[in-house]
Amino acid sequence: MSDPGYPRLEPDLATLLEAERSAMVPPAALDRVRVRLDASIAGASGNSASAGPRARGLAAAAIRSGKAVFVMGLLSGLPLGAALHAMFRGSPPFRTVSVERPSPGSATGASDATGRQGAQAVATDGEPKASDRISTDRTDSVGARPPPRPARAVSQDPPSSLLAERSLLDEARRALARDDAATALDVTDRHARQFTHPQLAEEREAIAIQALVVGGRYGEARRRAAHFEAVAPNSLFLSAVHTSLASIP
Amino acid sequence: MPAAYVWSSLRRLGVPAADLEDVTHDVFLQVHRRLGQYDASRPVRPWLFGFAYRRASQHRRRAHRRHEIPGEPDTATHPGVPPDRQLSVQEDRKLVLLALEAMGMDRRAVFVLHEIDQVPMSDIATSLGIPVNTAYSRLRIARAEFAVAVRRLRVHEGRP
């Protein structure tokens, strides 16, 4: 149905509304909402998981997780399609596993199953670094059985970690925008060391790979991108990674 | 950005600046609970606005006893506006928020969605759960109310 011909707003009134349209919400306020919502959803999911019967299973947990990802995606400014993709892609949430590197003198086989799995996941890189502690939620790619997955999708870190993660990755992104690959990599490494259960691990990896390309470390970039694609084949950040790799001369 | 959109919508629907963080948080909690009802073929903004509208209505019913100053500016900024025009734009914005206060919530919602967010009327009708003709009727009255309110406020403030 088209506008049935009611009087429109006078031009000067329409101009007034531009002032309201141009108003920008303070980003710090939205960050505070994000952090609070993160905590609220995490609490709700955790309570639900503990109270509900186990028969609800991982599928229900994945749906809850996906919902959390979707809502947090909306809050983080993801486009709707991306947020929906994150919700409906059907994969479990991105999860980080720390890689235990045995010291030269230590006994072998000391790491637990998770550690072994993580070590296998990063085996494509010759020199695992802190930044190699990336998700292994697609463990079938390394032929290992995944450990029992917690029902919660969001980080186990304190609620304020999302804001801190966001801040670090923004710093890395700014460095990347200046073509300062060394700083970008340094910051992504710092992120990997600092957050044991990051919520923005995929974004960090994408930035690191782009930084490797900018820094001319093409081989490393390709290896890390291959690993990233293997463990997170449905990541929203893959297109950025592919674009970056395509720019390699 | 959806979070900023919800925030701005709540402001336009009369939620005081001091309560915006709390109410935005509540809206997204509701979104989280009702996500299964979202029709992915529909635009997300009017759907989110529906949550904001219901929550803002509830908030206003509860808050009517408080001594709040309608149109009290929040900490929003206006990027892209030259520094010499910032003050004027902020005054215009305050005028808009005050004029919106003159409308009932149902008409205000249609006006905000159509005139500020530029959402098509069919989507507005869907998100508010009303017939399209009703939405148009509310818009017509809201436009007139807005014009009258702005004129009255300008006279009151001695603005041209």
Image: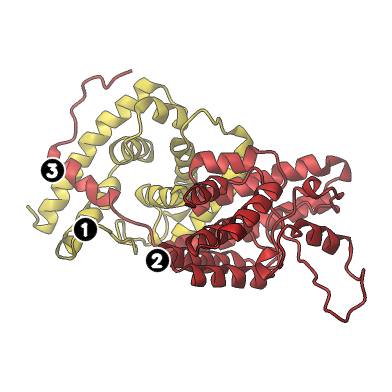
Chain colours: A red, B yellow
How far apart, in angstroms, are the residues tagged by discs 1 and 2? 26 Å
Q: Chain of mark 1?
A: B
Identify the disc placed on residue B126. Answer: none
Residue that badge 3 annotates: A12
Please name the residue shown 75% across and 47% down the image: A138
Residue that badge 1 annotates: B81
Please name the residue shown 84% across and 47% down the image: A143
- Name the image quarter holding residue A86: top right
Of B130 and A85, which appears nearest the observer? A85
Q: Amino acid at mark 1?
A: Val
Dot 1: what SS? Answer: loop
- Name the image quarter holding residue B71: bottom left
How far apart, in angstroms, are the residues tagged by discs 3 and 1? 18 Å
Dot 2: what SS? Answer: loop
Of A53 and A171, which appears nearest the observer? A171
Dot 3: what SS? Answer: helix
